[in-house]
Image: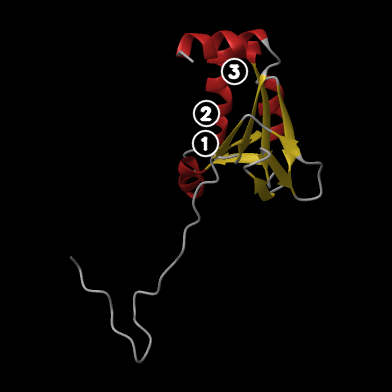
Amino acid sequence: MSSEAVVTTVAASDPFRVVVAGGGAAGLETLLALRTLAGERVALTLVAPHDEFVYRPLAVEAPFGVGRARRVALDDAARDADATFVPATIEAVDTARRIAQPAASHPLEYDALVLAVGARAVLRSRTPSRGTTAPTPK
């Protein structure tokens, strides 16, 4: 099947269902880009464990009175992108059946699943504990 045939098939059928897991910068950018580029040809669902996005680079300026962290309610961001917001974490994914299972919510069927779950900072001690050695710089 040529790529032209695939595009025609998707456009002529129900909207392409996209579940975006993650309410950070990557998840929101994905949501907005898909809506802008694909329009009504996609049905978007945003799944995130928190109810707001905090733009963290601005958070460091708050103690200095320069500014404050920008906060965006995820349900508002989803509504602006004509998407559904599910406040939960995805606990399981059945790739064969294309179903994502959020915690305490109904299963979400998808045609594409975007994992934009971000990263978590982990603080390491600068002083090695007794019996260990410090990593050597490379």
Between residue 116 and residue 130, name the one nearer to us: 116
Q: Residue visible at 52% across and 21% down? A: 33
The amino acid type of the residue labelled 3 equals Arg
Q: Residue visible at 50% across and 44% down? A: 56
The amino acid type of the residue labelled 1 equals Ala
Q: Which residue is mark 3?
A: 35
Local secondary structure at mark 2: helix
Q: Nearer the viewer, mark 3 or mark 1?
A: 3
Residue 114 located left or right of residue 66: right
Local secondary structure at mark 1: helix
Q: Separation of disc 3 and disc 1 at Cα?
A: 15 Å
Rendering coords of residue 110 (x, y %): 67, 32
Q: Residue visible at 47% across and 58% down? A: 121
Q: Which residue is mark 2?
A: 29
The amino acid type of the residue labelled 2 equals Glu
Tags 3 and 1 in contact by the CB under 8 Å rule?
no
Rendering coords of residue 61 (x, y %): 46, 44
